[in-house]
Image (cartoon, rainbow, N blue to C red):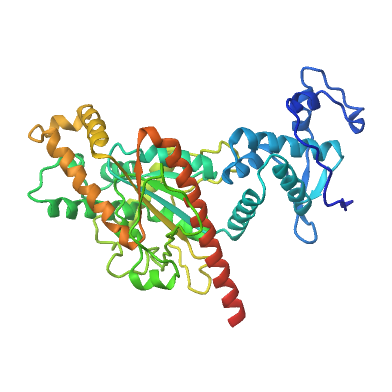
């Protein structure tokens, strides 16, 4: 293979409407190929650019404008700008007959184009950080917790699109499959729609159901830890105490925790913002090493039952691929036993728990409308709306009580929803950056000690 020596190409400033004008130009090297004026803008999609990897350039991938634009979107570059930069890069390479290019040369020219459009060092560093994150295959688990009608599903879906994460799991679906496909002790009526003698009894039952759901998620979490795949889990059946590590493990991670409740409309991330990443240690059973919070196998769901549910979820296609690309990895709900030794455990996983809450007045209005449309209300006529809302408020207060253990509570409002997404996007990037930095430091320390 004839390797291109040139490290960079002179990049001209972007000109308004250049996509249309450039698409109509034919480079001399393509004189033998006839393109009609109607299809001239598509010629760059038909020409393949090979990007070679490694010092010996023994592996390559075909440059995809779609995947490149998604990667740029992760850095917080607006989607429409990311699409233009990806097109400009491919046009630049093809017009200069660079159909075989190294990864380093590709990035040199990409960064020049980013700088020309005003996305300089800050965005370039984010791009490098995310490249390092994917290269290290650091497991990432994002937990989007909260009660009903606070926007969990919407937030999780939007974050998955922004961060190019294909795997989103909903605890409601896991709950229903466990309830209908196994003999798990789960009721058809939601826990907050039942009558309890006290708030303590309600929280006790809520935590028990969360542990059962956690058992149903075991296959996904073990696979994420083993393969280094990112995953977002959202739903009401997420008890932070099951996923947050104990004080001993948390202090060893070098991440300080403090009480934290964020109003994204007025908050900005800076160097002084405390980012809470949690380390979860996986043993032979796939659970974390926290004796007081490990989900045992005696919670009413056997491994065989979980396996049946996993197969059902796979067959129903309940794990959505948000990227729409054939190469996007989908989480497979497997329940095979995976032994992860301390010597070969790989990078420390990044666990980011987030609780969403809403102003009481707005939340109550949404809940009243949502509750009135639920079919289970017919099964519990003795429960009035005020009691149901009070139960949800009790659960929300419980979820928000873990701020001292590193949990971040985010206030959601319909009027500031875009700002909330922007804040969470930046917050998660900081979590990933700190998590990859800690992982790199630990790996270097282990090598030096060896």
In the image: residue 130, left or right of residue 116 = left
Relative depth, front residue between 220 and 138: 138
In the image: residue 135, left or right of residue 335 = right
Residue 115: % across, % down: 71, 44
Q: What residue lies at 35% left-to-right and 59% top-to-bottom?
A: 243
Which residue in the rendered view is the most extreme toward the front? 266
Q: How many marks?
A: 0
Relative depth, front residue between 260 and 131: 260
Q: What residue lies at 60% left-to-right and 52% top-to-bottom?
A: 126
Residue 384: % across, % down: 11, 33
Q: Quadrant of residue 28?
A: top right
Relative depth, front residue between 71 and 48: 71
Residue 56: % across, % down: 80, 61
Which residue in the rendered view is the most extreme toward the bottom? 449
> Does any portion of residue 364 appear in the rendered image?
yes
> Does any portion of residue 319 appear in the rendered image?
no
Residue 20: % across, % down: 75, 24
259 above or below 143? below
Q: Quadrant of residue 301?
A: bottom left
């Amino acid at each position: 293979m004839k390797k291109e020596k040139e490290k960079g190409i002179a990049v001209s400033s972007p000109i308004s409407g250049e996509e249309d004008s450039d698409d109509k130009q034919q480079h001399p090297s393509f004189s033998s190929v006839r393109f009609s004026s109607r299809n001239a803008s598509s010629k760059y999609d038909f020409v393949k650019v090979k990007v070679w990897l490694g010092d010996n350039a023994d592996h390559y991938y075909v440059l995809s404008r779609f995947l490149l634009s998604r990667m740029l979107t992760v850095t917080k570059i607006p989607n429409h700008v990311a699409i233009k930069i990806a097109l400009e890069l491919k046009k630049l390479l093809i017009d200069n007959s660079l159909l075989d290019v190294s990864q380093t040369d590709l990035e040199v020219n990409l960064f020049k184009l980013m700088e020309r459009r005003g996305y300089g060092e800050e965005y370039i560093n984010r791009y490098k950080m995310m490249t390092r994150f994917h290269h290290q295959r650091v497991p990432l688990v994002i937990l989007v917790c909260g009660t009903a009608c606070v926007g969990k599903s919407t937030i999780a879906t939007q974050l998955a699109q922004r961060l190019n994460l294909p795997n989103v799991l909903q605890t409601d679906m896991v709950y229903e499959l466990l309830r209908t496909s196994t003999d798990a002790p789960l009721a058809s009526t939601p826990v907050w729609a039942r009558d309890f003698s006290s708030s303590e009894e309600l929280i006790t039952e809520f935590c028990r159901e969360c542990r059962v759901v956690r058992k149903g998620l075991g296959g996904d979490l073990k696979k994420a830890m083993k393969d280094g795949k990112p995953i977002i889990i959202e739903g009401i059946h997420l008890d932070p105490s099951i996923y947050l590590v104990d004080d001993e493990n948390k202090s060893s991670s070098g991440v300080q925790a403090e009480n934290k409740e964020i109003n994204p409309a007025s908050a900005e991330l800076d160097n002084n913002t405390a980012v809470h990443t949690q380390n979860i240690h996986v043993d032979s059973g796939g659970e974390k090493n926290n004796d007081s919070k490990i989900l045992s196998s005696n919670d009413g769901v056997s491994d065989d039952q979980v396996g049946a549910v996993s197969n059902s979820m796979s067959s129903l296609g309940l794990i959505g691929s948000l990227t729409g690309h054939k190469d996007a990895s989908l989480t497979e709900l497997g329940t095979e036993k995976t032994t992860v030794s301390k010597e070969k455990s790989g990078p420390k996983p990044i666990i980011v728990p987030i609780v969403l809450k809403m102003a009481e007045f707005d939340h109550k209005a949404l809940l009243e409308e949502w509750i009135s449309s639920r079919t289970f209300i017919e099964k519990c006529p003795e429960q009035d709306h005020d009691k149901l809302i009070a139960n949800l408020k009790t659960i929300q207060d419980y979820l928000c009580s873990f701020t001292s253990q590193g949990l971040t509570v985010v206030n959601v409002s319909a009027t500031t929803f875009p700002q909330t997404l922007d804040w969470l996007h930046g917050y998660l990037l900081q979590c990933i950056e700190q998590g990859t930095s800690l992982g790199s430091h630990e790996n270097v320390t282990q090598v030096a000690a060896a």
